[in-house]
Amino acid sequence: MSTSNADANDLESEYEALLSFMYLSPVGIVRSDKSGLVDMMNPLAAQLLMPLVKGGGIENIFDSLASVAPELRNLVASFEVERGPVCENHRVFVTPARDGAVVLACSIIKVGANLLMTVLTDISRQVDAERRARQTESWLAGIYTSVNDFAFFTLDAEGCIESWNPSVGQLTGFAETDVVGRTLSRFYAHDDIVLHRSPAHIALTRDEGWHVEECWCETKSGRRYWGQILIAVLREEEGDISGYSVVLRDVTERKVTSDNLARLLTTDHLTGVLSRAHFFEIAGSEVARAKRHSRALSVVMLDADYFKRINDTAGHQAGDEVLKRIADEAKGLLRESDTVARLGGEEFILMLPSTTTNEAMAVAERLRVAVERARIDTAVGQLKATVSLGVASLSPANPTLEGLLAAADRALYDAKRAGRNCVRGGFADPTDVDCSVCEDGKASETDGCPATATENDNSNSR
């Protein structure tokens, strides 16, 4: 074989080896000229870049990354050395820097006067882990700003308190005999005990390695304070969970400040209940928690009856007073763990964790009666108002938040069709319209029953 043929074969073998390396590499590799014009890339690089080009071709690496990393082109242009690393593990956030962000590490090497090799690696999981670590470090740093406002103790593998030290007594007033063998609920405020809170906190800690919960707590003497509880898993050498470490902190002062800000951002300015936007922010988590722990969850959707008529005859200021009174009556009936929000106009919704359908129907009926009995002071005198309510519960038929709300909305319309001022469940047969206003469930014009309203009134009442 001639020398020229041997050299050609060697070059071909090297080229095939380069291709094999690129295609089998666990990272994305792109070869381009100095301007970014691509002449070779492996499948993983194409996969990582494809979301950025929105279905188009990947002809220029800098154009493909321009929307998320426009600085790369300038880095290359300003790199005057003929060979060497232009950048190493430069982080490119493909999606916004939040939970679940897609992040690439980009390294560009100049291997010739007009030849670049770009290496792309998906480091999303690493960045998420770093975020969690920073969150933990920040939280722990906050704890040690004062040695007088936190207590440290441990739980056994079943979630019962197994150790005590003086910091517990200093913060809570409880002696060792008061707490050892008890669960975290020992520290909760008596009027704010949610049955699932302690086991749910432990379950989330097992899943994530650590978890933070905040709730109202109470000292032995009865002083309420806003407690922040951090639980971290303790493991044996084999990896089995042996118990948990707990830091309990009094963060009441911080809560007062943050609550004032949160109130402005998350509440309806007129009624003081949650805003529609904030309700939907938390509702999904409530549904997920209920499904994860196989617990009941119900919602009550309610609407002020003939609200347009109130505005038209008494004025919008009087209508505002009616809405505020409905919200106040709802808040007065609910527990700390329940939620009431204004969905818009005259429509409200209650979310009731750990509440069965029958229990939610009872809550809805109590609210209906409370509103009906209320005498609402306005600038034009006292007014009376009623509400119609629809109830639905999480179930195989309503397994999602969207399904739950749709079922409650159907039940609310059933209550409207039944004559208003009544409660209907999402499970009810639409033909079963026993009206709680009218005697024997029958509407009559002589009774003054709202069910006799005209078609136009019905169309404007929501």
Image: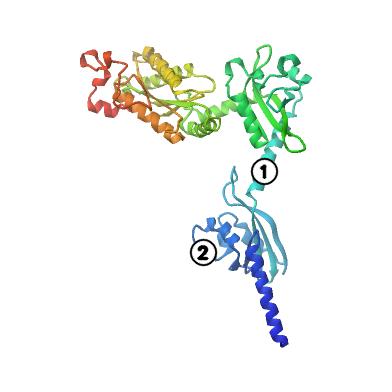
Horizontal side, residue 455 vs residue 29: left or right: left
Count of picture labels: 2
Q: Residue furthest bottom?
A: 2
Crowd class of label 2 (few under 14; some 14 to 19; many from 20; radius 10 Å)? few
Q: What's the residue type where badge 1 is placed?
A: Ala
Crowd class of label 1 (few under 14; some 14 to 19; many from 20; radius 10 Å)? few
Q: Quadrant of the C terminus?
A: top left
The nearer-to-camera label among 1 and 2 is: 1
Q: What's the residue type where badge 2 is placed?
A: Gly
Horizontal side, residue 274 vs residue 459: left or right: right
Residue at the (28%, 26%) spot, across then down: 431
User: Which element type, helix, strand or loop, lies under badge 2?
Assistant: loop
Residue under circle 2?
57
Residue under circle 1?
129
Q: Position of residue 198 (x, y in %)?
A: 62, 24
Residue at the (73%, 38%) spot, across then down: 239
Q: Between residue 290 and residue 323, name the one nearer to us.
A: 290
Q: Position of residue 281 (x, y in %)?
A: 51, 34
The quarter of the displayed image where residue 168 is located: top right
User: Which element type, helix, strand or loop, lies under badge 1?
Assistant: helix
Image vertical order of residue 99 relative to residue 64, above or below: above
Image vertical order of residue 434 relative to residue 35, above or below: above
Q: Position of residue 378 (x, y in %)?
A: 37, 15
The colour style of the image is: rainbow
Image vertical order of residue 455 relative to residue 444, above or below: below
Q: Position of residue 30 (x, y in %)?
A: 62, 64
Horizontal side, residue 425 vs residue 213: left or right: left
